[in-house]
Image (tube, rainbow, N blue to C red):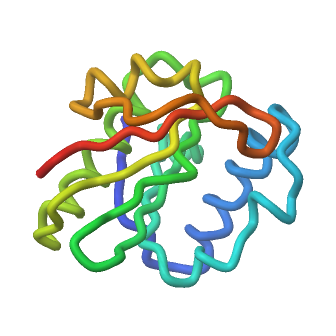
């Protein structure tokens, strides 16, 4: 069974960090000092668990009338099962509860179609972040 929830405990936050370390640092080669930033303390984190095994995560930050989704990750063996979509839908719902006007994210270029299916539209040109091509995407609320 898949459960996707807001992180409430230090243990759950450690699971989030472990997933991000596995996906971004080990698998994609993102430097740890970029991945583990000082924004985690102000973010709302979500965690997906499948049959008691940590599967994926994401976070959302707020700045005035904007929200920014980031650090969405699903462990390799659990991809293509709807977990990423569930994580994003919960993050979008959290943003809607806070009455923001728009949600911004920086999508890896390969994930642009995934986010487009969730109502995000590409803005601007491709740029490099942590050695990976990204595009800015926005969803109006």
In front: 16, or 102?
A: 102
Q: Is residue 22 left or right of residue 109?
A: right
As drawn, 68 above or below 97: above
Q: Is residue 64 left or right of residue 61?
A: left
> What is the quadrant of residue 120 in the picture?
top left
- Residue 100 appears at what percent x and percent y? 17, 67
In front: 134, or 56?
A: 134
* Number of callouts: 0
> What is the quadrant of residue 124 in the picture?
top left
Q: Residue furthest front?
A: 124
- Residue 21 appears at what percent x and percent y? 78, 51
- Residue 119 appears at what percent x and percent y? 21, 31
Residue at horizontal 45 percent and vertical 23 percent from the top: 112
Point out the image quarter for the N terminus.
top left
Residue at horizontal 34 percent and vertical 43 percent from the top: 88
As drawn, 81 above or below 69: above
Q: Is residue 67 left or right of residue 81?
A: left
Residue at horizontal 56 percent and vertical 68 percent from the top: 12
- Residue 25 appears at what percent x and percent y? 83, 46
Residue at horizontal 60 percent and vertical 80 percent from the top: 10
As drawn, 102 above or below 42: above
In front: 139, or 82?
A: 139
């Amino acid at each position: 069974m898949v459960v996707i929830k807001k992180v409430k405990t230090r243990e759950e936050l450690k699971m989030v960090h472990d997933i991000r370390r596995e996906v971004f640092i080990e698998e994609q080669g993102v430097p740890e000092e970029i991945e583990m930033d000082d924004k985690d303390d102000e973010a709302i984190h979500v965690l997906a668990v499948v049959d008691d095994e940590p599967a994926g995560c994401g976070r959302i930050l707020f700045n005035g009338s904007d929200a920014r989704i980031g650090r969405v990750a699903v462990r390799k063996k659990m991809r293509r099962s709807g977990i990423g979509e569930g994580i994003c839908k919960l993050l979008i719902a959290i943003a809607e509860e806070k009455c923001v006007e728009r949600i911004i994210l920086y999508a890896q270029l390969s994930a642009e179609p995934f986010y487009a299916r969730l109502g995000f539209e590409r803005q601007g040109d491709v740029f490099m972040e942590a050695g990976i091509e990204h595009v800015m995407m926005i969803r109006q609320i």
